[in-house]
Image (spheres, helix red, strand yellow):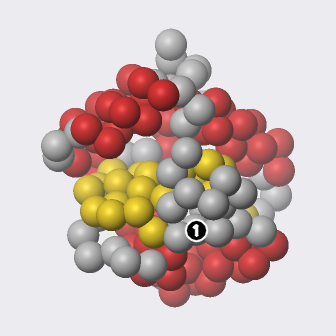
């Protein structure tokens, strides 16, 4: 499974009007409903918040990977947002976050979940990928850059 399998172009956005972690998670939940018509934005938001309560999903360098295991989904579903300005995500490096990759996985999909998180963390550790994502001027370019840096397809 690669990023193109889980992130459709309509789930990649230059976000607007996001000034907090809560609002980032709300918008992410709304975007993720486009890949999970059987789940509501509220259910997804609650799943993401529950995971955040266990510890921040901010991985450093301005990147967060909020994720949740969800009943009612059979496949991994992803979404990506670049925020208009960085927000505090309580990351270990104490840097605010402007790149947010959301991931939903089936409740019983532990290994697939961990593999995808590992690959995303690898991709988001590359300075070139981060720079290109931050420079993308529109949603389509943001999606192309995201797919171009998928470690599985390189």
For label 1, count other residues whose C-alpha is less than 10 Å away and answer few (under 14), some (14-19) or many (20+). Answer: many
Q: Tag 1's secondary structure?
A: loop
Question: In the image, 34: left or right of 72?
Answer: left
Residue closest to the far top? 154
**Residue sitting at x 17%, y 43%:** 137
Residue 143 locus on image (x, y percent): 31, 39
Residue 70 locus on image (x, y percent): 68, 69
Residue closest to the far front? 94
Image quarter hosting the N terminus: top right
Say which residue label 1 marks. Answer: 89
Which is nearer the eye, 96 or 101? 96
**Residue sitting at x 45%, y 79%:** 20
Asked whether the viewer can see residue 69, the reply is yes
**Residue sitting at x 67%, y 53%:** 93
**Residue sitting at x 71%, y 37%:** 118
Asked whether the viewer can see residue 104, the reply is no
Residue 6 locus on image (x, y percent): 50, 44
Question: In the image, 37: left or right of 115?
Answer: left
Height in image: 153 above or below 39? above
* Number of disc labels: 1
Question: In the image, 106: left or right of 19?
Answer: right
Residue closest to the far left? 137
Residue 67 locus on image (x, y percent): 64, 61
């Amino acid at each position: 499974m690669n990023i193109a399998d889980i992130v459709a172009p309509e789930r990649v956005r230059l976000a607007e009007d996001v000034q907090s972690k809560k609002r980032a998670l709300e918008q992410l939940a709304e975007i993720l409903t486009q890949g999970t018509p059987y789940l509501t934005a509220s259910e997804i938001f609650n799943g993401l918040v529950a995971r955040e309560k266990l510890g921040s999903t901010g991985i450093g360098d301005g990147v967060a990977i909020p994720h949740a295991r969800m009943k009612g989904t059979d496949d991994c579903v992803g979404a990506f947002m670049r925020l208009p300005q960085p927000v505090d995500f309580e990351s270990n490096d104490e840097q605010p976050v402007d790149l947010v990759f959301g991931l939903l996985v089936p409740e019983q999909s532990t290994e697939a979940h961990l593999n995808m998180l590992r690959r995303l963390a690898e991709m988001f550790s590359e300075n070139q990928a981060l720079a290109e994502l931050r420079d993308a001027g529109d949603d389509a370019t943001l999606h192309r850059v995201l797919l171009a840096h998928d470690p599985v397809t390189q």
